[in-house]
Image (cartoon, grey):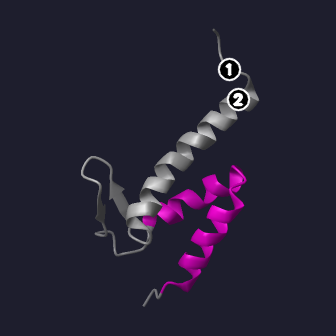
């Protein structure tokens, strides 16, 4: 085996992104980050849901509409004051 075809590789990358993002949403939705080794949430970056914010462009590019919309709706409802 050589390199997988582009469509297969895209699917693999998408699956890996979703694996990590689901770990975050299952345990720490709305928090800044998930600490992968301890499985605990960290909210020390001003409680801005940073993982979610940082993932928006990736979700959009990958066509993950449901995840994108859920994150966008949560972020837009946050009280930033």
50 left or right, relative to 7: left
* Tag shown at residue 45: none
Q: Secondary structure at mark 1?
A: loop
Q: Nearer the viewer, residue 26 or 70?
A: 26
Residue depicted at 68% across the width and 20% down the height: 4
When asked about the image quadrant of residue 11, the answer is top right
Q: Is residue 31 above or below residue 3?
A: below
Q: Reply above or below: 79 against 17.
A: below
* Residue annotated with mark 2: 8
Q: Is residue 24 left or right of residue 63?
A: left
Classify residue 42 as left or right of residue 80.
Answer: left
Q: Dots 2 and 1: beta carbons under 8 Å?
A: yes
For mark 2, give the secondary structure: helix
Kindly give the residue lying farthest to the front in the view shown.
26
Which quarter of the image is occupied by the N terminus?
A: top right
Q: What residue is rendered at 49% in x and 55% in y?
A: 22
Residue that carries the numbered disc 1 in the rendered image = 4
Label 2, label 1: how many angstroms apart (C-alpha)?
6 Å
Is 35 situated left or right of 31 in this image? left
Question: Residue 75 at x, y = what percent?
Answer: 54, 76
Report crowding for label 2: few under 14, some 14 to 19, many 20 or more residues within 10 A (C-alpha): few
Q: Which residues are magenta?
A: 50-78
Q: Nearest the camera: 16 or 81?
A: 16
């Amino acid at each position: 085996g050589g390199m997988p075809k582009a469509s297969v590789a895209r699917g693999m990358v998408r699956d890996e992104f979703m694996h990590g993002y689901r770990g975050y949403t299952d345990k720490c939705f709305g928090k800044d980050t998930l600490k992968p080794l301890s499985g605990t949430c960290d909210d020390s970056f001003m409680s801005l849901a940073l993982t979610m914010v940082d993932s928006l462009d990736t979700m959009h590019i990958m066509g993950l509409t449901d995840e994108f919309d859920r994150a966008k709706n949560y972020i837009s409802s946050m009280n930033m004051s």
